[in-house]
Amino acid sequence: MKEIQQIYKQLKTKHPNLLTLDDHKKIQQLAPHLNEEKLIRALQIADIVVSEIGLGRTAVLSVLLANEATEYGLTESKIKDTFDTSVSTVIRGLCRVEELYRRNMSIETENFRKLLISFAEDVRVILIMLADRLYTMRQLENYEEEQRQSIARETSFLYAPMAHRLGLYGVKTELEDLSLKYTNRQIYKDIANKLHQTKKNRDAYITAFITPLKEKLTQMGFDFSIKGRTKSIHSIYNKMKKQNTTFEGIYDLFAIRIILNSKPEKEKADCWQVYSVIADMYQPNPKRLRDWLTIPKSNGYESLHTTVLGPENKWVEVQIRTSRMDEIAEMGLAAHWKYKGIKGESGMDEFLKNIREILENPELNAVDFMDEFKLNLYDKEVFVFTPNGDLHKLPKGATALDFAFNIHTNLGIKCVGAKVNGRNMPIKYVLHNGDQVEILTSPIQKPNAAWLQIVTTSKARNKIRQSLKELEYKDADSGREMLLRRFKNWKIDLDEGRLSRLTQKLGYKTVSDFYQAIAQNKLDILNIRDQYNDLDKREISSEAEKSHSAENFSGTFYNETTDKSDTLIIDKNLKGIDYKLAKCCNPIYGDPIFGFVSINGGIKIHRTDCPNAPQMIERFGYRIVKARWSGKSAGTQYPITLHVVGNDDIGIVTNITSVINKEKDILLRSISVDSHDGLFQGHLTVLVNDTKELEALIKKLRTVKGVKSINRL
């Protein structure tokens, strides 16, 4: 109790008007669990918050009530009713941050730092967190070694950079030094000992350096103070590592700081005038001049730094700034509100832009500053957790479906909803910061085109499009298999050329679309059979041999004959594997080929130059198997379609069929030719044994009078 009274007395002495008697009574009512141990800690953190960071009543009340809210359920509405909105907002932020820490996750990610700031809402939450961590680091000797290491590493990674970002150089330096003390005790101890051993000489040197400066600046009428400051142990250690040198090799172990009490309008001019005095007295190093007056640092830091050659030819860093600049440098953004009327030309980045706008707003008084400033950083991002505590970053507006695809494509494809913070939500649920999301799946779920309107991330959109394409391919395969099976039962040979014309007649852009329609029961296969046969009859009846022209010629000559001989070796030495020759490229014996495992388990054989090969290899590489022809072509005949273009000469079709009929082992299966404006285009389907026979046939057909080109499809 005596310690509490002593701490509180010190706080009241430094800040007599901080809390009223009414505030004390309300705190006692709202926080009955605030025992002696917790009260000592809270008061010491409150002292850091007020004395070293510069916050006021709202922050102190939040510190004293935070434990009651996080541990014992003190409600936000009760705090708001008892005090005001600003206190309840800060405590809500502290509770959310406490909740964040309880998640099972790694804090050593940039995402965690962003989420932490996003959760905080009010800048005072971050400042109170820094004060809390500084108090913890000062008491770290009382913790177990494992805890010490963990807390020190976390402080070095997360809290010290955050203090630096907010311009709290005093807090940042102490956090860094204490972190080094516990993570690398020997280094810390060695540097501290050497600093202690050289202190007397260093103090004497500083005195010798600043004495003539004091005299000169006093003569010029400046109101100022000068102090020497030894660099922090952490800073010295960093220099030793960076410069790859020993303690003795660091020449600028200390800095001289000149602080001017200047009028706002004369700040820059006075700093530059003092610089000229120093430059006249000691030789400056032009490469070491740092002008943060003209362009302040992103966190608001303003100062003029120069390095000069002092007595005994030692380099000395000199910092020149005003009392306003010094206070902002030590206390960071919390000091800004005291200087609301000063509109420096500082180039602050987005992090402090809102602060400066508030400071320069004549409608706001200084007390309102912190209440108006809310953290809206990372407002284009949202951070959510998996059930295991892994943290993921997505763009703002992302949905549960986006999150599913962000985790894994298969999870996205099967996603039917999500359990968000324990509640079931649809796939279109828009994620919020800190949501814990568990994706719900179903084995029968399939993507649909409407999903493209639900997702916002390009990754999800691309994966959905890819999945829809795969479904189309599967439907097309399934539809083709259905048609082939029924045609086989009806003893109808399926001719690709005729089917292509039927597809166009039915209004489908591609045969693949036609097959999909069959798979989706949009077409009646009986009706397809009738139309296919009708088309066959019309083509035969308009046979070009009946006219002097090739126009509208078509005919069927032979049925396909095949030998069941095993002429393929698939993968390594596997024989007897069930396979089919792909209709898209119609491979024949002698073509370079590969196998593709289809969705029903069979293997389709494709030519390596098949138009679909690049896409299959890229998207379904795991389904590709090696294949090669075995021995010699053993009498198996393969249907090949040739595309012929030529002049519409009399008897050209007769001449073409005559060449084919003269070939001993080649059979003409069907022919269809259309003529237009004196030119004809036709499709010939022939049965050949291998590529050598085919190449020989093509060579002979090119010699037929009137034939312009002939190519294998």
Image (cartoon, helix red, strand yellow):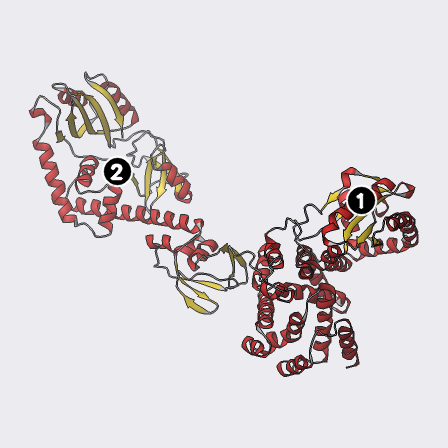
Q: Position of residue 544 (x, y in %)?
A: 10, 26
- 18 vs 170: above or below: below
Q: Position of residue 35 (x, y in %)?
A: 69, 81
How crowded pointer 1 is (Cα within 10 Å; few <14, some 14-19, many 20+) is rated as: many
Give the Cα separation between the discs numbered 1 and 2: 98 Å
Q: Position of residue 557 (x, y in %)?
A: 14, 30
- Foreground disc of the pair 1, 2: 1
Residue marked by disc 1? 275
Q: Upstream in the sequence, badge 1 or badge 2?
A: 1
In the structure shown, which secondary structural element does the residue marked by tag 1 occupy? helix
Viewer-proximal residue, 432 or 477? Answer: 432
Q: Describe residue 634's horizontal placement relative to residue 360 as left or right.
A: left
Q: Describe residue 533's horizontal placement relative to residue 118 as left or right.
A: left
Q: Describe residue 578's horizontal placement relative to residue 367 as left or right.
A: left
Q: Which mark is residue 564?
A: 2
Viewer-proximal residue, 178 or 169? Answer: 169
Amino acid on which the number 2 mark rests in the picture: Lys
In the structure shown, which secondary structural element does the residue marked by tag 2 occupy? loop
Q: Which mark is residue 610?
A: none
Q: Quadrant of the N terminus?
A: bottom right
Q: Which quadrant of the view contains residue 691?
A: top left
Q: Describe residue 520's horizontal placement relative to residue 418 as left or right.
A: left
Residue 251 seen from this side: no
Q: Position of residue 81 (x, y in %)?
A: 56, 78
Q: Which quadrant of the view contains residue 676?
A: top left
